[in-house]
Image (spheres, helix red, strand yellow):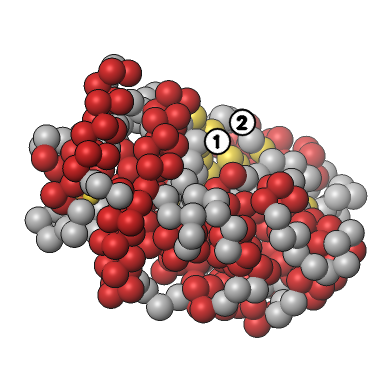
Amino acid sequence: MDKFSFFSNILSFVSTFFENILKIATLLIPWYQENKRDLPWRATRNPYYIWLSEILLQQTRVAQGLPYYLKFVEHFPTIKKLADAREEDILNLWQGLGYYSRARNLHHTAQVIAYQYNGRFPSNYQDIRALKGIGDYTAAAIASFAFGLPHAVIDGNVNRVISRLFGIEKPINKPDGQAEIKIALEQIFDPSRPDIWNQAIMEFGALQCTPRNPNCTDCPLNTNCLAWSSKKVNIIPTKEGKTKVTQVYHSYLVMRLGSKTYIQKRETGIWKNLYQFPLIEKQMSDSEVINHFTEEFGIRKTIHLHSIREIEHILTHRKIFAKFYTISLNTGSEILKNNIFEIELDDLGKVFPTSVLTLKYLKQQK
Ligand code: SF4
């Protein structure tokens, strides 16, 4: 859509909707009150709980995030408790949710609020936005839900609803598309009740105006929806340049000595500070992998290769082809490495937080 058509769409929308703000809110908010899901973070104004829920729900479905939210609130009922927790305990609770940098940032930010802000969550948008792990969307969500400040949220749901209502065909993941979304959103955002308005439009996107098969025939906004009237619901919103997925190869060495095994703490990457079996991140043949590990750990003459288990694991930008090489060690084998330590295999994933990929492997062993 060119600039002229975009602005004429806006104008036609505005003319159709005399007193636009009131009208959309008049339709959207009753819809929300009738259809909203009962979620614990909607029943509080406590910025700590709201922040926690927003971080847990990033890239995560509500059904998956809810039990994590309940666990976190139970274990760390205050921001001070979270700040004073061991990172390992936080990662253990987070285990299975992925994107572990969120958990590390959560811990860091809890410490900043507990000790630099004396435990009081900052109450203006700029200070909230300056906290580690908090972007535009999360800052607007906390500012509006906890403090009633007039900041409109823009997440995936809002992008979809707005682009369809206003017939915005520019890619929503590009600056031009985002600029149009913001202009359009300003036309209908109700700053007098930002908390409920933001909740309503996000819930509307999650339940009614869904990515696939939106419920258009029974939609309270359909008479005012340009995508619906122009039969473009299935092509709006548009996105440009799909995320490139790279293939990576992981070879893990699972050394077994009775009920015990050996693990390392990861120092870099998305799984930083999680525990894992010794790993080579490179494509190699089975014999090269075994030779590499036996030399690295000085166990050349003592091993018996028990099994090789292959698992594929998909992350947002990566597809991991993993192989787990299980070897049995003879009693008395000495593992020649400082950064490796012996644990009960059963403790991996319980006492020692680990990745979903390793959990998948452990599950297959049961
Ligand atoms: S008519 Fe369809 S596309 Fe338009 S707002 Fe409603 S559900 Fe979304």
In the rendering, which numbered label is found on residue 314? none
- In this rendering, is residue 179 above or below 357? above
Left or right side of 39 for 252: right
Name the spot of residue 309 as percent of width and height, x first.
Answer: 49, 51
Q: Are marks 1 and 2 in contact (CB under 8 Å)?
A: yes
CB of mark 2 near ligand 1 (< 8 Å): no
The residue at which mark 2 appears reads as 282
Q: Quadrant of residue 10?
A: top left
Q: Nearer the viewer, residue 231 or 316?
A: 231
- In this rendering, is residue 212 above or below 195? above
Name the spot of residue 134 as percent of width and height, x first.
Answer: 66, 49
Which residue is outermost to the bottom? 74
| Residue 272 visible to the viewer | no
Q: Residue at x 22, y 39 (%)?
A: 15
Q: Quadrant of residue 142?
A: bottom right
The residue at which mark 1 appears reads as 249
Q: Residue at x 59, y 58 (%)?
A: 149
Query: Helix or strand or loop: what does disc 1 sit on?
Result: strand
Instruction: Name the residue type under label 1.
Output: Tyr
CB of mark 1 near ligand 1 (< 8 Å): no
